[in-house]
Amino acid sequence: MGIVGAANAAEAVKAAEAIKLGSQAMTAGWIAIVFLGALAAIVLYMIMKNKIDLTFVISEEDGSASLSRFQFLVFTFVIAASFIMVVIHTGELPNVPAGVWGLLGISGSSYVVSKGIQMSNGAKPPAAQGGTTPPAQSGATPTSKPDTPPQSGAG
């Protein structure tokens, strides 16, 4: 009977360790959820207060639509929503298939390639544009000097 008691005690210790690890994992999960929720709330608040500008989320700097940005945004949201629904439904983290990672990679790389094509066609990056305006409309050319009053001979 001593051997059976020892076996039961060993099983009880294993079960206690599993419960302890499970509760630690659950606590870590809740901490992560609260942290991510707080970050999401801060970002949404900043968007509502116009501190985060969403003007060019799916458009280029000149205001034209960007299919690659839109595709990347939609793919990311669809995959994230699917992942969240699977976690809610099953209660555990799923294994993400390699094809899903491949689709996200293709979508992201299409944006990078489109930017590369734009730069190779001579488009300036937004930082290089600097928001400057063309020369004055009064007929001045870039090589002409601005109008200055004549200086007197005394200097």
Image: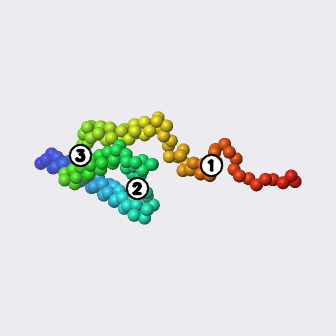
Q: Is residue 79 left or right of residue 54?
A: left
Amino acid at dot 2: Leu
Q: Compare marks 1 and 3 and give the one earlier in the sequence.
A: 3
Mark 1, mark 3: which one is toward the viewer?
A: 1
Residue identified by numbered label 1: 139
Element type where label 2 sits in the image: loop
Mark 2, mark 1: which one is toward the viewer?
A: 1
In percent of width and height, residue 145 lies at: 70, 47
Residue 43 placement: quadrant: bottom left
The Cα–Cα distance between marks 1 and 3, rounded to whole angstroms, is: 67 Å
Amino acid at dot 1: Gly
Element type where label 3 sits in the image: loop
The Cα–Cα distance between marks 3 and 2, rounded to whole angstroms, is: 32 Å
Residue identified by numbered label 2: 54
> What residue is rendered at 40% in x and 37% in y?
113
Q: Residues within 10 Å of mark 1 (few under 14, many from 20)?
A: few
> What residue is rendered at 35% in x and 43% in y?
68
In percent of width and height, residue 8 lies at: 16, 49
Q: Is residue 87 left or right of residue 64?
A: left
The Cα–Cα distance between marks 2 and 1, rounded to whole angstroms, is: 38 Å
Q: Compare marks 2 and 1 and give the one earlier in the sequence.
A: 2
Q: Compare marks 3 and 2 and give the one earlier in the sequence.
A: 2
